[in-house]
Image (cartoon, helix red, strand yellow):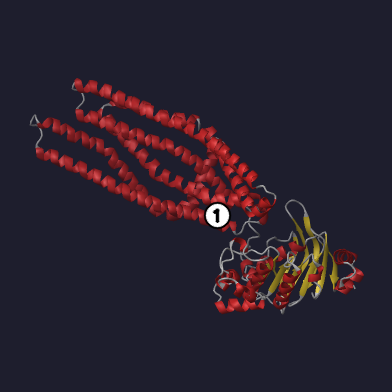
Amino acid sequence: MSDSFRTTLGVARRAVVLFVRPNMRHVLLTLGLSVAVATASAAEPLLLKHVVDRLARLGAGDQSMHEIMAGVAIFALVITARILGAAWVTTSAWAVRLDVEYRLRSRVAGKMSVLSSRRQSEIGTGALRYAIDSSAPQAATAFTDVAYKLVPTLVYVVIAAWGMARLDRDITIAVLCLLPVPAVVAFLSAKRQRRRELMHNAFWKRLWSGYTERLTGMGTVRAFAQERDEEQRLLRRIRWAFASIQRGVRVDARTTVAAGLSEATARVVVLCLGGYLVVRGELTIGSLLAFLGYVGGVFVPVQQIVDLYPTLRKANVALETVFEVLDADEESPDLDGALPCAPIRGRIRFEDVSFEYRSGRRALNGFDVTVAPGETVAVVGPSGSGKSTLLQLLQRVHTPTSGRVLIDDQDLRTLQITSVRRQYGVVLQDVVLFNDTVAANIAYGRPTASRDEIATAARAANADGFIMELEHGYDTMVGEAGRSLSGGQRQRIAIARAFLVDPAVLLLDEATAALDTESEEAVQDALRSLRRGRTTFIVAHRLNTVRDADRILVVSEGRLIGNGSHQCLMATCPTYASLVRHQLGTEVGLVA
């Protein structure tokens, strides 16, 4: 058994366990009925033979009209039952397919929310979308095609071969010798076609990723007048992909041609040999008609089986894409036995914390500090010094390589992270708003909030004024990523969102870095109100935003090199003093 075949079997087995077994009763019921329909189809040529032969003997007085009508009635009943059963199988198979597809999509969607940031970046947004939009439907379609086409078709072929053998063994052998030809042609091109599918899969993931990036960065594309160049690059890639797909279609078409020629040859063989035997009186007209019916009936299912191969090939590649996502590293998952976090009082301690990325880059080294409940602590330092990593460790986006992060004297790793994050308020530089109403964006962290509570939070964030000036007030759609609002407006909506969840701990990461002076003043006023009585971490490059913090932590190359007030640090920490002088100049009050 080849490694690729063994891998394919492993992928298929895992997919059945994860996505099919939960609905196995419905799957087996539908499969049983589809086999019954296939059996009825295989019986039709034999029933036709008996009716025709009885009609031929009617003139000789060997048969009564009553017996013939009974045979016709049975024949009609079997056909009717097959048609009704096939309709039921189609409906039920679609229900199974949609159930499998839903399970696939839900697993991938669930995984996307817990992917580690590193792995999410490696896979890419486009590839994740491709796994949900394309790979999941392909895999679900393949399962239903295999279950409700392959198995019934095999049953039909076996019964049809038995029926033909009862009619005439020599003609049956001649027909069965031609039957494997399409499968042999498909097998010979299998390896090359699988390589092509893998290449296509990788191509479309890259294309989707690039396309998503261009849409997100369309402002930059237009700013440099690159619209036509981007369009031409995209179209060239798509043309290449379509040309490759067309080459694959031509290869698959050879199998279709082989099947058609095999069936035509089989019909000619049956007509010649069968006609000869009818003339000699060794075969009845009914048997010849039954043989012709079986030839069409056998080669069509065999062609269906051969046509399943491209479907299975694509499904296997699609499942590999799905499992690539499902097997990816998660973002610091909860430990077994993790406990819900009690209401946070606000005491936070970094206890000799070090953190190293998988690339080997060390972001923090021996970081040790305690923050009292309700204290506002600013974290400053050069770019890449580890400031944002501190906030990520607090949110358990990352887990310390060594040391501990304690919340109210409890190790963060022993707590269910969802119950911790619900007590955080986070305001970032790059605010994420969704294409929904202003009210829905404010209530994102607490969807059950009333309109009065939403408005109260907006007033606290200095946002109610501009919101009421919008066309539909709180019911105004903000557009994709909130692009219909200014940067300062988006920041104040983010602050209102934090107000609404009433957090115990507030994390501000460059919350005013991209704002103009007027917007920054409004946002700073809102943040001062939000910080009151809450443990607050402020990460900032702009040092004028941290002047009223209770304490300032200076971080450099992952180490804590300064801890104290502004005046203390200006006298005792050369790095901090250099940062202040370089950024603000001697005329700014901070330097005094």
Residue where numbered disc 1 is placed: 108
Query: Residue sitting at 28 percent across and 45 percent down?
Result: 82
Q: Quadrant of residue 435?
A: bottom right
Along the line of sight, the residue nearer the viewer: 239 or 394: 239
Query: Residue sitting at 50 percent across and 44 percent down?
Result: 315
Along the line of sight, the residue nearer the viewer: 106 or 35: 106
Q: Does residue 207 appear in the picture of this structure?
A: yes
Residue at the right extreme? Answer: 571
| Amino acid type, callout 1 | Val
| Residue 510 falls left or right of residue 231 | right
Residue 29 screen position, x and y as percent = 36, 51
Q: Does residue 180 appear in the picture of this structure?
A: no
Label 1 neighbour load within 10 Å: few <14, some 14-19, many 20+: many
Residue 251 drawn above or below residue 335: above
Q: How many marks do you count on the picture?
A: 1
Residue 491 screen position, x and y as percent = 68, 68
Label 1 secondary element = helix
Along the line of sight, the residue nearer the viewer: 385 or 184: 385
Along the line of sight, the residue nearer the viewer: 271 or 492: 492
Q: Quadrant of residue 447?
A: bottom right
Residue 427 screen position, x and y as percent = 68, 68
Q: Quadrant of residue 195?
A: top right
Residue 24 screen position, x and y as percent = 42, 53
| Quadrant the C terminus occupies | bottom right
